[in-house]
Image: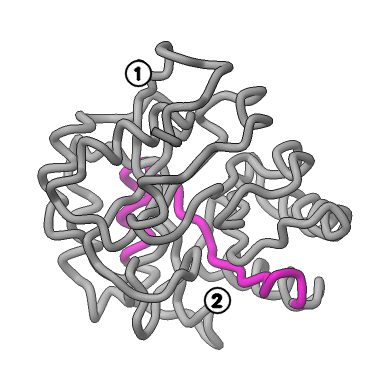
Amino acid sequence: MPHLTRTARGATDTGIRLGFGIPGFAHPLVAPLEWGELTRPGTPLKWVVLNVANGPGERPDPHCLEAAGRLRNGGVRVLGHLDARHGARPFGELVSDAHRYLDWYQVDGFSLDRCPTERAALPEVRRTVTTLRALVDHAHIVLGHGTHPYPGYAETGDQLVTFAGPWSDYRWSQVAEWTADYPPERFCHFVHGMPRGHLEEALRIARWQGASTIYFTDRVGTDRVEGAGAGDPWESMPGYWDEIVSRIGTGVSE
């Protein structure tokens, strides 16, 4: 099968400990149960993206502030959502949004949605990430490519989203060979439209492809890497949330 072709890690990948990266639920007023579930003790949660209004919004939102505060008080990283628009977003706008996330929500880092993948765009992404790291001590930066980018991006972000899309593509996906040079903690997979009956297969694919951060859902919608909005598959929890939590286990290794 295509997802079992990784040669540099082989069977040792079965020991990969998985955890969740949450791409961004709907607003806490729309999805209160989802945000509440994230604070349940023992949930293997690595980080949660806060997306107020495709960014930080125009003013502080008390509901988002409360939700983010509960997570941070529980030791969970909260990342501000920044839309890079595949490299079309001006540097100044991204930094301005980052400042508002930090001032209003005290975020622990940022998720750069729709991050470019090309080699030519790498210097500008590196410039942006360097600036973001200067704003937050020990900032956690996730580059939301949604596919395998030029390998140099792995030296820029803390984590790369190397798959974001439907189950129909994921089950036949192949991993880029260069990823074998990096530990599983560097890679994230987001899969939507995945039926409950394929959960074990999906977990096996993530481990064999060397991605330790995942989010699987049976919701369907557009293929945006992160964020919440109309038709967004990430805006609510999967129907099998309890089952996937129990399969992964309690706590995370980081």
Q: Position of residue 93 (x, y in %)?
A: 74, 78
Q: Is residue 51 above or below residue 20?
A: below
Instruction: Inspect the image, locate mark 1, and give the three-letter code of the amino acid beneath it.
Output: Thr
Task: Check disc 1 and report the residue beneath it.
Answer: 14
Report the number of numbered marks: 2
Please name whichever residue, 9 or 110, is drawn nearer the observer in this view of the structure: 9
34 or 184: which is nearer to us? 184
- Secondary structure under badge 2? loop
Instruction: Give the camera-side residue of 41 and 148.
Output: 148
Please report whichever mark, 2 or 1, sits nearer to the chain's N-terminal start.
1
Rendered location of residue 106, percent (x, y): 53, 59
Left or right: residue 128 versus residue 17 is right
| Residue found at x 15% / y 66% | 33
Measuring 75% from the left and 37% from the top, which residue is drawn there? 155
Residues in magenta, as a range: 67-88
SS class, disc 1: helix
Q: Residue at x 83, y 60 (%)?
A: 121
Q: What residue is disc 2 on?
A: 55
Along the horizontal axis of the image, is 243 left or right of 114?
left
Which residue is found at the position 12% from the left and 59% from the top?
A: 239
The picture places residue 14, in percent across and down from the top left corner, at 35, 18
Using a 10 Å C-alpha cutoff, classify the residue at mark 2 as few (fewer than 14 neighbours), some (14 to 19) or many (20 or more): some
